[in-house]
Amino acid sequence: MLLLKNARVFAPQDMGDIDIFVGGGKVLALGSNITSVPAETMTVDLSGFVVTPGLIDLHVHFAGAGGEGGPIFRAEPLSLSSLLESGITTAVGLLGTDGYARSVMEVLQKAYALEMQGISTYIFTGSYKIPPVTVTGDVATDIIAIEKVLGLKAAIADHRSSHPTVEEFIRLASEVRVAGILSGKVGIFHLHVGTYPDPLYIVRETNRMTSIPLYHFLPTHMNRNETVLGEALKFALDGGNVDFTATSDMEHPQTCEAIMHLVEAGVPLDRITVSSDAGGSSPLFDAEGHLLDVKITTPEDFLKQFLRLVDLMGPEKAISVFSTNPAQRLGLGKKGKIAPGLDADLLVFDNEWNLKRVIAKGRPIWGTIQN
């Protein structure tokens, strides 16, 4: 058991300086001057420190991705330490462009490995291609039968996608919705979005023709360029949810500026999430479609963008975007907040917002605290 004393707690709401009592992987109590704890409890004085929920990365290639340009550009699996250093205590893995030499089973096994090392993990079945690659041979069966599978990933509006017809897309969206209903999960159709004109056309058409709720669709990379960002704004104003990629690449609309652009235009903050795309490739093509370069993304921009949003909008809103909102979007009811009964996934920052300690499922697993 663990008692964190006198921490400034954002849960995400500002709770002031309080104590957090942790046991069995859960937050057991919050309050001022908690003293009635078992003798074996480890007590840590966090006076002058800030505690937040752990960050949730809903799009991370933790089993490796890439491959554009050939096998030499295949990204290696991510280490646990690379995720923890970026404050990630819950990660959702997935395949990228390569649904041929890589498999969903690889992603699933990496998820189990990271879970055994201490963090919480989930995955999306599928890859860029349609028909999707799966574990069981069927999208709905993957979602229903495999606890870690939260939904399906596919690519749209991208030259590397399978260019599905509206009818093909409707069938897949229907499978995801039914599987969500039968499994008790949200049933997320997670969409890599490219740069084609009108990139969300197929999603809007599916919603119009079938009334499949927009909450099943989660398009990502929606700050890819100004045109895509404009589509993100329209989609979110219509009631959809959008995910931005944490990036420091100045050729793209910056993550925090994209968030503020939507909020200032009237989008509710709870419709916006951010993910890292870490472990994936960021290929550069010329105007004729020739591959010029491939960069492998890392998780570090995720924490950088979180801290930038803390500066721009304050801790409560930043935590909502990077932790509370993703938990809600994915149906992870025990994540994204600090409250009794919820998972004790906690980050400890000093008073200058330097990450000092990561606690995942109640266990300190990264960093040190020096009072």
Image: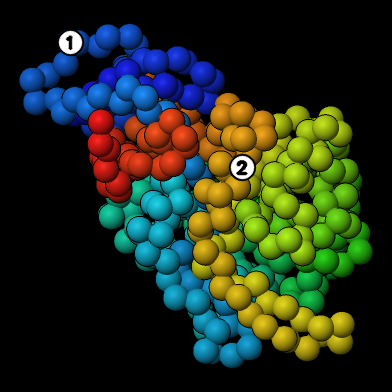
Q: In the displayed structure, does residue 4 sit left or right of residue 336?
A: left
Circle 2 sits on which residue?
Answer: 308
Q: Please state the horizontal and vertical placement of residue 331, each as a whole percent of the image.
A: 54, 38
Front in this rendered view, residue 324 or 255: 255
Q: Residue at x 65, y 58 (%)?
A: 248
User: What's the amino acid at mark 2?
Assistant: Arg
Question: Which numbered mark, 1 or 2, is in the foreground of this view?
Answer: 2
User: In the rendered image of this protein, does residue 77 appear above or below residue 81?
Assistant: below
Q: In the displayed structure, does residue 337 sit left or right of residue 210?
A: left
Q: In the displayed structure, does residue 170 sit left or right of residue 146?
A: right
> Mark 1 or 2 closer to N-term?
1
Secondary structure at badge 2 equals helix
Front in this rendered view, residue 189 or 179: 189
Q: Quadrant of the N terminus?
A: top left
Check residue 248 in the rendering and tell me which mark sits there, or answer none: none
Q: Please state the horizontal and vertical placement of residue 20, each as a whole percent of the image.
A: 32, 21
Front in this rendered view, residue 188 or 366: 366
User: In the rendered image of this protein, does residue 152 appear above or below residue 35?
Assistant: below
Q: Are marks 1 and 2 in contact (CB under 8 Å)?
A: no
Q: Residue at x 91, y 64 (%)?
A: 197
Circle 1 sits on which residue?
Answer: 36
Q: Please state the horizontal and vertical placement of residue 301, each as a whole percent of the image.
A: 56, 55
Q: Residues within 10 Å of mark 1 (few under 14, many from 20)?
A: few
In whole angstroms, how far apart are the C-alphas of marks 1 and 2? 38 Å
Q: In the displayed structure, does residue 13 sit left or right of residue 355?
A: right
Q: Residue at x 73, y 41 (%)?
A: 259
* Residue 139 is at least partly visible in this image: no
Q: Residues within 10 Å of mark 2 (few under 14, many from 20)?
A: some
User: What's the amino acid at mark 1?
Assistant: Ser
Q: Please state the horizontal and vertical placement of residue 49, each as a whole percent of the image.
A: 38, 28
Secondary structure at badge 1 equals loop
